[in-house]
Amino acid sequence: MAAVKNLELPPLDGVLASLGEYVAIPSDSRNAGRGTMRRAADWIAGRLDFAGGRVEETGGHPVVRGEWLGAAGAPTVLVYGHYDVQPTGEESEWLSPPFHLTVDGDIARGRGVSDDKGPVFLVVAMLQAAIAQRGGLPLNVKFLIEGEEEIGSPHLPEYVRAHARELACDLVISADGAQWRPDEPSLSVASKGLVAFTITVEGARDDLHSGRYGGTVANPAQVLATILASLHNPDGSVAVPGFYDGVTPPGAERLAQLDAVPFDDAQFAAQIGVSETCGEAGYTTLQRLWERPTLEVNGVAGGGRYTVIPHVARGFISCRLVGEQDPRRVLAAVSGHVKRLGARGVRVTVEQDGGAVPAYRIDPAHPAIAAATEALRRVYPSQEVLLAVIAGTLPATTLFEQVLGAKTLFFSFSTADEKLHAPNEFLRLRRIHEGMRAWDALLISMADGPHRLQPTSPPEHAEANA
């Protein structure tokens, strides 16, 4: 590998000041208006000026695009991330305002700082520094930063298919995805799929006085409770016929690999504030996290703390999928199960929420995994690199594989315990410079090293940034 001048990283204070501007834009894709989402897109596009950063429209919130194509004959990677964030939840539970970046000791706190604004911005800041100091990059880099990941990327498939030629690449690198634990470097070789839906139970036209009408009509809240309770067996397994179609239990070799991963059930439970772990019988906690599908009730709404029979009740449910599970078939299985229960005196519907995503996997023997492992060892020389699984869902991965023919490497420097999607989301400050050094090493390794990516075709307009 040719010698490359060491990169002088941008000062942490400057990175945090810019990141604070980004976090201050409340780009909650579920609730924010178009103007707010556009402001967030414009902000990150402005930091991609070295790559012709621009905002492009979709059927929903816009995407941010860019490309630096000045490395003739070198491979091309597509950096993926998202600028949208989750809702804040109860703001009273936050230790500081959710859209104000607050440095608290060795962490920075704020909505989106870990998922995914911080991990994306550290890549952009690193590339800016590399171009300024070295005059260019070791390979060609394209960018696709979307604004709907947190709602299942409903408009991304249409956009990617329409722009497949422009997005062509040899590998996608996701700045989204989170490492397994803060005390060991890790790479994820799989992520779970997702299908989410709402079960709605409707009764009378209006809420009814529980004294005047009690005992005379079906109560939607009680019917919903019965339906929700029917979704699991007493042993924790999912009771819906057909739910497990496409799931292959882990074999002996995989079980041995999982057994070799240090994992303490009591410590895991204590860290999240529960007395013990539980779930599908016959599997360890780690096996359930990484290898088994789930069906979780995320919320229930209906009525309130007053004496009525609610006229409507809703249950919000998500299923994380593995193996060859088909999200559409899973949803159909749940709908059939609910219909067979035959609730009387009410109307029951099951409606999908957002996109549906199958599970994703990259072969641990893929050259990108080897290159990423080498890059992490440069930053964490005394630690082994763990091959982990993302128990969450990255909707774009299977899309990129189907449309672009490119695998996705997860290379994020957030960590799974940083309260993603919860109040008090945070990012460890040390991860910012660690991530920059690792991304720099990764791109150099992929361009000119033993794990070099093999270009499949020259990038469009390769002379544009020469």
Image: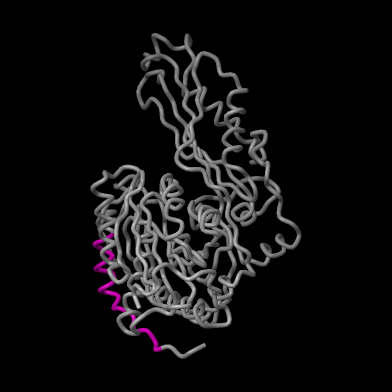
Numbered circles on residues, count: 0
- Up/down of 201 relative to 398, above or below: above
Residue 274, percent across and down? Answer: 51, 50
Q: In which quarter of the image is residue 78?
A: bottom left
Quick one: 431 or 141, which is closer to the camera? 141
Judged from this view, the residue extending furthest toward the right is 252
Judged from this view, the residue extending furthest toward the bottom is 3
Task: Tell me which residue sits at (50%, 40%) in the image.
Answer: 196
Q: In which quarter of the image is residue 303?
A: top left
- Up/down of 343 relative to 38, above or below: above
- Up/down of 434 relative to 302, above or below: below
Task: Tell me which residue sits at (35%, 44%) in the image.
Answer: 60
Residue 37, percent across and down? Answer: 28, 50
Quick one: 150 or 402, which is closer to the camera? 402
Residue 51, percent across and down? Answer: 32, 69
Task: Tell me which residue sits at (39%, 64%) in the image.
Answer: 143
Residue 165, percent across and down? Answer: 45, 59
| Colour basis | one colour
- Up/down of 262 relative to 292, above or below: below
Quick one: 353 or 346, which is closer to the camera? 353
Q: Is 8 a magenta residue? A: yes
Q: Is 349 a magenta residue? A: no
Stretch of the chain drawn in magenta: 5-22
Quick one: 463 or 81, which is closer to the camera? 463
Magenta: main secondary structure equals: helix
Left or right of residue 96, residue 328 in this image = right
Left or right of residue 232, residue 81 in this image = left
Q: Quadrant of residue 362?
A: bottom right
Classify the position of the C terminus by image quarter.
bottom left
